[in-house]
Amino acid sequence: MKPFCSHRGRLVILDRANVDTDQIIPKQFLKSIARTGFGEHLFQDWRYLPDGKPNPDFALNQPRFQNASILVARNNFGCGSSREHAVWAIQQYGFQVVVAPWQQRGETRVAAFADIFRNNGSKNGLLTVELSDPEVNEIVQMVERFPGLEATVDLERQRFTLHLAEEISFHFDMDATVKNRLIHGLDEIGLTLKHEEQIRAFESHHNPQLEGV
């Protein structure tokens, strides 16, 4: 997994809440046994019209958002089924960061991301940034006012910075374990291989078939 320290890129706004994984990558594209080829079908039903032509009203098809690598959405992003393909599709399209807001509704806090999607993201090197609703509203407003606006996401400092004439920055929280894994590019296999010598020693002692290896 590629280490993630910081990233600067153009922002695109997907102004929708409760974006589920079937919209991120529809089920008919999950038949492949490979982990490639999903990016072209990201948001398939929204990006394309029934005749197969790009939908000009959809954000990802608009010229001002071309080559964006930071996706800004609304709360409960990635809900629905647990398909890991949703993360692969987002990354293969070119996004390295997804930003979404949490919301407070009475005594209930609505998460920015569905738990399984967020976990799948961290295991594949996709950074999910959770900000408050007012902060994301401000980002959306700035992107609308300044076409081509870029931001830097600094994972080490846990800062999200809009590159305006007077920069605006937001702090985001991040689980320390997830942060460490992303910065060092360690997925679950990578974490296991950090203990390779101990594993080999254990196996050679407990499995006669590995003696002399």
Image: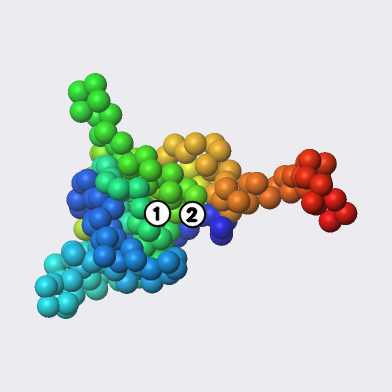
Q: Locate residue 122 relative to residue 111 in the image: left or right.
A: right
Q: Locate residue 58 relative to residue 170 in the image: left or right.
A: left
- Residue 105 lies, in percent from the top left, at 20, 28
Q: Gap in Å between the C-alphas at discs 1 and 2?
A: 9 Å
Label 2: few (<14), some (14–19) or many (≥20) C-alpha neighbours in 10 Å: some
Residue 156 - label: none
- Residue 35 lies, in percent from the top left, at 44, 65
At label 1, the amino acid type is Glu
Q: Nearer the viewer, residue 48 or 73?
A: 48
Question: Marks 2 and 1: in contact by CB < 8 Å?
Answer: yes
Q: Quadrant of the C terminus?
A: bottom right
Residue 144 vertical placement versus 122 (above, below): below
Residue 84 - label: 1
Residue 124 - label: 2
The residue at the point 22 percent across, 45 percent down is 18
Q: Residue furthest top?
A: 107
- Residue 154 lies, in percent from the top left, at 49, 50
At label 2, the amino acid type is Asn
